[in-house]
């Protein structure tokens, strides 16, 4: 075997051998399956070395062949350090790796030359074009970086026998984890170091470089507490000018550390700066807990890819004995950086660092915890049709489970009843899977989600014709799936059928209340307030009979919100006051808007703006003291507070609050959500300015809101009405009252033509029309429209159009 061939083979063997020797021998076969793949010669070489490494003295004689075979491979590793490389005098070896050796050296031609770390390519590897290019790229990458957090490149060259080398700044420091342990750093100190790391990595990203192997051993900390990034050996240039002709890969060789590698790295997919964000998430997790989020050392190596891709780490606060300091912000920050999907992590290292700074400054962080709803939707999208049936099954089982838990907790139904429901749920599961198989066999083709649902609906109705309770459960589950697919009309039809099926099984049951609550939420979301009120009143009445004195919070919130939509603000206030009292008595998490927000808005719509403002401030104080609160939560409350301040005539205060809310809407949120939210705030500011006659501010704010809403907010959404009101007010101020009236009348016609009128927005438009008539000197018309702006007034069909 030639020297070059030996070196090239060893470059491939060494990382696999080193990793295998850290595992128990019974894990070696599974690990080699993953690490060597189908490269049989590579695997044979590693296996022979492992046998040699594992021999006892008595067994050594029988393995003399393996030892002899391995000698050329170890020779390079054991070779003495050269005395000189280029102008540098070698002191000793600092370390050796697959690509070469690193020496401590200093220039021999200078009296007080600083020490350097000199890296030279391993003998023979310079004959491999791909590996030679990788070494050269590392030198070129370092040459582009000038940052206090990155070890600097000094110079480079080629040895007399043709091996490339480069000298870089020698960092006299400790690996990050060792430094933290030796100095017994507290939480603030750890986070301070992490922010330095983020700054250095962000600098590399701005220079179009992804590190791809961030880990504590590649991050040194000097004695004065400054970090230095090392080892850009597998870094990637995002710019195409270097190395665009071939990928840097080797069969069976992974150019990264699995415990710190992102899912897209282990899967061999495109790597972007998001991979470094993930690795930084691992580093942060390790700083906070002393452990890695996914401990692969305790797992079968054959499972590593699956674990990195699928396993969810525990929150850091759940790993340490006393996690109170980590619970909330730091849990959320670390877990957001570690999300499996690159697009759902922090979109840059800067944003990750900014959130850590916000935490240290006790300001709201922008990270959002993963929701169960998101994880469920993601699961369904991955699995498509088969899991659509699985989702139907799961929803059905969940419905049975919820009913059973409520019955056990509130009604103390005997255990044989619960067992019977479990049997029933099992039967439904079996039936649905049978249905999928039958449909596939019958039609002879894969089915789309809509086809499965279309066939499932009549089959369930027929098959469970004599079992209304099961039929109602499945109809409700199908309805919710239709709703998630955007088919609201079909969803409503199925949910109404579920209510009818449940009624035929028995009135005044917890199951019927559940069906009515689901229907009520759908109707509320589609602004069918009368139907939502009717369903919610009945559901709450059933709950009151079955569990007197116990408030169902979600059902009560739906009822109160339906009252609001129907302009029954006093009734809504009563419901929300009961919710607030219940929340104080039993402060558990609440699904949906906070009871204080709901109460404050019901007060504001009645004109009780002082009390509404106090209520919103109470909610803001509660959020500020809660680690679970998010910046979006705060932005919402501040927006409500701004509205109440505007109604009190405090325009400057209201505008300032809206600007604060705008800033709090996080950049990390889905772009559509962010644009709609920020557009709404700008539209409100525009209307506030227009009502004050400040058209110079109102017009650009309205234009900015339009730009944010375009393509994101459906044109049927009632919020667009605010911009029409702004346009009308500007026309009023430019002495064009007739045009303003025409604009507002057209808006009222549009609002009236919709299947379900948003009365609150309708009344605000009537009030604006009254203001225009006042300015126009038409007091009778103004009075007529002002009366129509009051809650409960009839809609103004054919009234006062000038």
Image (spheres, rainbow, N blue to C red):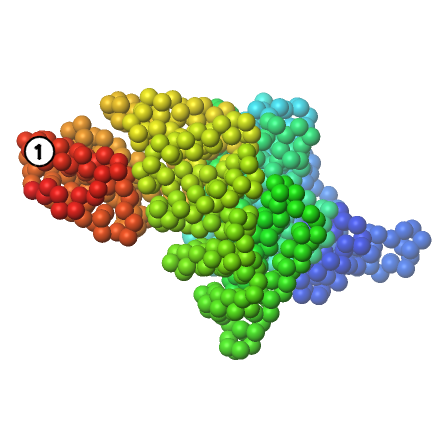
- Mark 1, other Cα within 10 Å: few <14 / some 14–19 / many ≥20: few
Q: Residue at x 10, y 41 (%)?
A: 800
Residue 684 in the image: x percent, y percent?
27, 34
Image-quadrant location for residue 605: top left
Count of number-bearing discs: 1
Residue 667 in the image: x percent, y percent?
40, 39
Q: Residue at x 17, y 33 (%)?
A: 786
In the displayed image of the protein, which residue is found farthest to the right?
58
Image-quadrant location for residue 230: top right
The quadrant in which the C terminus is found is top left
Residue 447 in the image: x percent, y percent?
49, 70
Q: Residue at x 40, y 37 (%)?
A: 560
Residue 207 in the image: x percent, y percent?
43, 41
494 w.r.t. 199: above or below: below
| Front residue of this view, candidates 321 and 243 | 321
| Residue 387 located left or right of residue 722 | right
| Residue 493 located left or right of residue 431 | left
- Where is mark 1, residue-wise? 780
214 w.r.t. 227: above or below: below
| Residue 474 located left or right of residue 780 | right
The quadrant in which the N terminus is found is bottom right
């Amino acid at each position: 075997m030639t020297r070059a061939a030996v070196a090239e083979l060893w470059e491939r063997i060494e990382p696999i051998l080193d990793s295998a020797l850290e595992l128990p021998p019974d894990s070696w076969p599974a690990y080699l399956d993953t690490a060597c793949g189908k490269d049989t010669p590579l695997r044979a070489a590693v296996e022979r070395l492992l046998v040699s490494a594992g021999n006892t003295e008595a067994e050594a004689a029988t393995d003399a062949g393996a030892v002899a075979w391995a000698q050329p491979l170890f020779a390079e590793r054991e070779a003495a350090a050269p005395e000189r490389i280029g102008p540098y005098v070698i002191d000793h070896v600092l370390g050796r790796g697959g690509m070469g050796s690193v020496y401590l050296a200093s220039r021999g031609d200078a009296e007080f030359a600083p020490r350097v770390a000199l890296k030279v390519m391993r003998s023979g590897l310079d004959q491999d074009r791909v590996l030679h290019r990788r070494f050269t790229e590392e030198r070129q990458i370092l040459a582009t970086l000038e940052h206090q957090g990155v070890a600097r490149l000094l110079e480079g060259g080629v040895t007399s026998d043709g091996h490339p080398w480069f000298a870089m700044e020698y960092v006299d420091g400790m690996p990050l984890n060792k430094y933290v342990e030796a100095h017994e750093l507290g939480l603030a100190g750890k986070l301070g170091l992490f922010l330095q790391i983020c700054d250095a990595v962000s600098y590399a990203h701005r220079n179009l470089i992804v590190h791809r192997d961030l880990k504590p051993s590649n991050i040194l900390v000097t004695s004065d507490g400054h970090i230095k990034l090392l080892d850009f050996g597998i870094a990637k240039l995002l710019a195409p000018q270097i190395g665009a002709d071939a990928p840097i890969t080797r069969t069976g060789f992974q150019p990264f550390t699995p415990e710190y590698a992102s899912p897209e790295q282990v899967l061999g997919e495109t790597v972007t700066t998001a991979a470094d964000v993930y690795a930084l998430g691992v580093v942060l997790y390790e700083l906070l807990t002393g452990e890695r989020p996914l401990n692969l050392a305790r797992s079968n190596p054959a499972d590593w890819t699956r674990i990195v891709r699928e396993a969810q780490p525990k929150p850091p606060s759940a790993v340490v004995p006393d996690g109170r300091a980590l619970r909330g912000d730091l849990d959320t920050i670390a877990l957001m950086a570690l999300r499996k999907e690159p697009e759902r992590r922090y979109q840059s290292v800067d944003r990750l660092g900014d959130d850590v700074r916000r935490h240290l400054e006790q300001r709201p962080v922008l990270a959002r915890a993963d929701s169960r709803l998101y994880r469920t939707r993601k699961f369904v999208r991955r699995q498509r049709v088969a899991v659509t049936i699985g989702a139907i099954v799961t929803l059905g089982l969940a419905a049975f489970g919820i009913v059973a838990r409520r019955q056990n907790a509130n009604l103390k139904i005997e255990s044989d009843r619960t067992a019977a429901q479990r049997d029933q749920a099992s039967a439904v599961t079996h039936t649905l899977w049978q249905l999928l198989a039958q449909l596939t066999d019958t039609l002879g083709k894969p089915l789309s989600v809509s086809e499965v649902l279309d066939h499932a609906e009549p089959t369930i109705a027929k098959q469970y014709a004599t079992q209304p309770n099961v039929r109602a459960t499945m109809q409700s589950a199908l309805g919710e799936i239709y709703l998630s697919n955007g088919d609201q009309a079909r969803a409503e039809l199925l949910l109404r059928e579920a209510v009818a099926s449940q009624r035929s099984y028995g009135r005044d049951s917890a199951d019927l209340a559940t069906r009515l609550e689901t229907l009520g939420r759908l109707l509320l979301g589609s602004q069918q307030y009368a139907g939502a009120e009717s369903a919610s009143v009945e559901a709450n009445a059933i709950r009151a009979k079955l569990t007197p004195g116990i408030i169902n919070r979600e059902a009560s919130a739906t009822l109160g919100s339906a009252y609001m939509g129907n302009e029954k603000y006093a009734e809504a206030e009563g419901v929300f006051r009961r919710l607030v009292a219940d929340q104080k008595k039993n402060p558990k998490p609440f699904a949906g808007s906070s009871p204080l927000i709901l109460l404050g808005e019901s007060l504001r719509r009645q004109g009780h703006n002082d009390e509404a403002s106090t209520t919103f401030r109470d909610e803001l104080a509660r959020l500020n003291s809660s680690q679970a609160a998010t910046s979006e939560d705060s932005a919402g409350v501040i927006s409500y507070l701004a509205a109440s301040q505007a109604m009190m005539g405090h325009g400057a205060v209201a505008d300032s609050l809206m600007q604060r809310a705008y800033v709090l809407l996080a950049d990390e949120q889905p772009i559509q959500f962010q644009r709609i939210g920020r557009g709404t705030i700008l539209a409100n500011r525009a209307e506030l300015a227009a009502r004050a006659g400040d058209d110079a501010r109102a017009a650009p704010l309205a234009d900015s809101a339009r730009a944010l809403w375009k393509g994101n907010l459906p044109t049927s959404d009632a919020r667009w009405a605010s911009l029409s009101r702004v346009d009308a007010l500007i026309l009023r101020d430019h002495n064009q009252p007739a045009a303003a009236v025409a604009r507002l009348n057209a808006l009222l016609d549009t609002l009236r033509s919709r299947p379900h009128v948003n009365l609150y927005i309708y009344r605000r438009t009537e009030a604006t029309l009254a203001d225009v008539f006042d300015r126009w000197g038409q007091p009778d018309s103004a009075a007529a429209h002002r009366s129509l702006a009051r809650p409960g007034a009839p809609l103004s069909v054919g009234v006062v159009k000038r």
